[in-house]
Image (cartoon, rainbow, N blue to C red):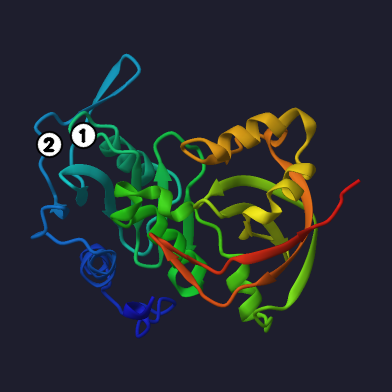
């Protein structure tokens, strides 16, 4: 993350203690995530004194002697807490994790996620999970670590978390790899996940393509002239439900299990124009022929 580019995390200056972690690490991080003490929708609350400083573990009630360093609110609701510790403190296990957990489950706080940072490392926990959701050392952080942190702690993570479930688009990957539009490809055993009727003449199939051990979402369009060819590849036990689903409102067939999906074969070419749809961009393929799979 660019805001930390000038910091040598392997050689923090002398006297860099908990207060420095708050000001030099946590505050800039929260700024980058879009939080502020002055924003009611994405609010930072510092060192809130709890009115009911007790946390119950089973039948036992334990008094909390301190207060959370930061409570982060999204749209007026508590989203997560952050605890700042000195660089020499263990934030992965032990008393500090137990302390942060006790804040998280307190009746006044009641959040699912809590974070600890000691200036060299950051770790994110879920109150219902034994293993952390994310851990990394700032000195070794990769782009994917920052991306995952954003997915877990940004306002969108609590407002609209589904936007992070999108897979990379296969059509855009093909362009990145040098494929040119209108170049014909053959797809065998392409598993159908969803089918949408876009209008009277256009249908779209969504499928997962695996490339270099990574899953990509691919979109394949075909027009009404190929509808019967497509239906010939649908398994007999699914033909009626597929046809009914995409010919009647809401004009879509969505699979929820492998039994409801099926594989098809076809020829298609990459189209030329990127489609922007809500939170994603994608480049669809155009099917020109379904290949007999018998």
With respect to residue 285, does 182 lie above or below?
Answer: below
Residue 256 in the image: state x and y as whole percent: 60, 35
With respect to residue 169, does 133 lie above or below?
Answer: above
- Secondary element type, mark 2: loop
- Secondary element type, mark 1: loop
Q: Which numbered marker is on residue 225?
A: none
Left or right: where 33 falls relative to 262: left
Quarter of the image for residue 186 reads: bottom right
Counting residues from the N terminus, which is met first, the one under dot 1 or under dot 2? 2
Disc 2 designates what residue?
50
230, 256: nearer the viewer: 230
73, 179: nearer the viewer: 179
- The residue carrying pointer 2 sits among few (fewer than 14), some (14 to 19) or many (20 or more) residues within 10 Å by Cα, namely some
Residue 76 in the image: state x and y as whole percent: 15, 44
With respect to residue 272, does 80 lie above or below?
Answer: above
Q: Is residue 141 visible?
A: no
Disc 1 designates what residue?
64
């Amino acid at each position: 993350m660019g805001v930390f580019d000038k910091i040598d995390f392997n050689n923090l200056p002398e006297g860099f203690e908990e207060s420095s972690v708050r000001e030099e690490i946590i505050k800039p991080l929260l700024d980058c995530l879009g939080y502020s003490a002055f924003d009611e929708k994405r609010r930072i609350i510092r060192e809130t004194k709890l009115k009911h400083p007790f946390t119950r573990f089973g039948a036992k009630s334990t008094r909390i002697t301190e207060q959370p360093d930061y409570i982060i609110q999204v749209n007026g609701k508590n989203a997560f807490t952050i605890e700042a510790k000195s660089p020499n403190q263990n934030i992965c296990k032990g008393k500090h994790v137990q302390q942060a957990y006790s804040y998280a489950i307190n009746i006044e706080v009641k959040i699912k996620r809590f974070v600890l940072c000691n200036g060299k490392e950051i770790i994110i926990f879920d109150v219902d999970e034994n293993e952390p959701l994310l851990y990394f050392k700032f000195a070794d952080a990769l782009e994917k670590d920052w991306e995952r942190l954003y997915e877990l702690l940004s306002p969108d993570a609590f407002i609209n978390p589904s936007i992070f479930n999108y897979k990379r688009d296969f059509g855009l990957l093909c362009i990145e790899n040098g494929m040119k539009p209108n170049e014909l490809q053959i797809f065998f055993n392409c598993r159908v996940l969803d089918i949408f009727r876009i209008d009277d003449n256009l249908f779209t199939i969504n499928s997962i393509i695996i490339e270099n051990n990574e899953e990509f979402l691919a979109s394949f369009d075909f027009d009404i002239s190929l509808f019967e060819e497509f239906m010939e590849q649908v398994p007999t036990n699914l033909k009626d439900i597929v046809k009914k689903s995409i010919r009647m409102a809401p004009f879509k067939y969505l699979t929820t299990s492998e039994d409801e999906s099926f594989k098809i074969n076809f020829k298609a070419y990459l189209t030329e124009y990127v489609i922007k749809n809500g939170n994603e961009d994608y480049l669809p393929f155009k099917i020109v022929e379904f290949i007999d799979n018998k």
